[in-house]
Image (cartoon, rainbow, N blue to C red):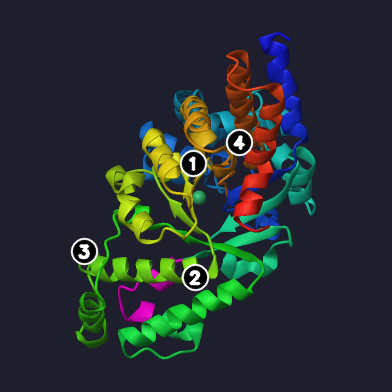
Amino acid sequence: MSVEALFSDLMQELEHTTTLDTHEHLVTEAEAIAAPRDFYYLFKHYCQADLVAAGASPDDLAFFDDQNEAPERRWQDFSPFFNRIRTGAYARAVMLVIHDILDLPDLNDDTCIEVGRRLQKIAEPGLYHNILHKQCNITTSILCNRYDNKEGYPDNFYHLASSVEVTNIMDKNGVDNLAAKSGISIHSLRDLLECLNKVVCDWCTDDSVVGIKLGHAYFRSLEFKKRTFYEAETIFNKILTNELHTLSAHEAIPLNDFLVYELVARAEAHGMPIAIHTGLQAGNFYRISNTNPLLLQDLLLEFPRARFDLFHGGMPWVREIAVLAKYFPGVYLNMAWMHLISPAQSRSALSEWLDIVPNNKIFGFGGDYTKVEKVYGHLVMARRNIAQVLTDKISAAEMSRQEAGTVIKRLMYDNAAEFYCI
Ligand SMILES: [Zn+2]
């Protein structure tokens, strides 16, 4: 079989393989349908970070999206920026939607209005089934940070509960919110831990919750240190007693560390997976050094029986993170968002991971989008990457065609289903 034939054979198999989408931020279908659509709709998530990196100002972004302005005028201003980002991977997912779903050859002066019309036309009840099920062969999705709105989602959407409300206690508001949520009043750190027990137990008894998400890398270092109760209590008491009832970000770190350890201890005891954001943050101007997955070593060593889903391959630390999954039985690697950040880095990472890490410890796809149409574009990019890596391995006699079939099933569904007990 030629290399081209092998690649398309693997692509076909990937297309026919039922997929579990391990990480999404999708709004509900009702919210999606209500949103106005034009050419800029497809750029209103990750692409905005590329537009900013390409020089667009906050005023520019607001103008591109201003529904009171004529779309032709907005397109005129937008298109020079689009030309700067169109060769990047974020924009590639947009182009796949325009080409495959909207059946248009390109986004340009001639098609910019029609793109909006066709997006509007498909925005009707059944949109999610059409895109996710029919076009993507995705049967199951795991959502992040949408648990409070879970009634708006169908049964095949599962949830990661957000750790923020139980670990990021910075002020009296945070204390009051947690007390209201758990029905336990808080007058001491011991009360706070009672609330933590209650909240984690509530998550564990809800079948729609399959794990807990730690998104701390957006606002602090992933270096969670072991702290004593006394150390945490001294800081927590400041919230209860000082005049402002507020901690600075720096001041709150030891309390935050302590609560993360307490949360992970409870998750470990209940067998509840912990998903952790590692690597690149979505947006601009973040502190990337906070997100190196190697900073998690202390936490991983402390909880050898806990199960960790490390998101985004720790990009750009894709090699370092592989060592964590090789050392620790509880550490799994998730390619969510990766194919969209860099197909080239995703391919080289996956190729190395398949050498270094057992094949049951890699989750091959997570769309990581708010807009359902773009999940399709991302999934096509993911399938191409996986097919290319497997083609190379089979061609180099490092893997048999049959083994590649097993890897496909595991990456696209089985590994995540087993890990999250779905
Ligand atoms: Zn995400």
Does label 4 or label 3 sit earlier along the sequence? Answer: 3
Does label 1 or label 2 sit earlier along the sequence? Answer: 1
Badge 4 crowding class, 10 Å Cα cut-off, few under 14, some 14 to 19, many 20 or more, is: many
The quadrant the C terminus occupies is bottom right
User: Which-is-in-front pick, marks 3 and 1?
Assistant: 3
Query: Magenta stretch containing residue 358, yes or no?
Result: no
- Callout 1: SS: loop
- Dots 2, 4 in contact, CB < 8 A: no
- Callout 2: SS: helix
Badge 1 crowding class, 10 Å Cα cut-off, few under 14, some 14 to 19, many 20 or more, is: some
Badge 2 crowding class, 10 Å Cα cut-off, few under 14, some 14 to 19, many 20 or more, is: few
Query: Magenta stretch containing residue 175, yes or no?
Result: yes
Does label 3 or label 1 sit earlier along the sequence? Answer: 1
- Dots 4, 3 in contact, CB < 8 A: no
Q: Which residue is mark 4?
A: 378
- Taking depth in this image into account, of 9 and 128 the one nearest to the observer is 9
- Dots 3, 1 in contact, CB < 8 A: no
- Indicate whether 14 appears above or below 375: above
Tally of marks: 4
Q: Which mark is residue 269?
A: 2
Residue 170, percent from left and from top: 30, 73
Does label 2 or label 4 sit earlier along the sequence? Answer: 2
User: Which-is-in-front pick, marks 1 and 2?
Assistant: 2
Regarding residue 190, the answer to whether it shows in the image is yes
Q: Which residues are magenta?
A: 163-176
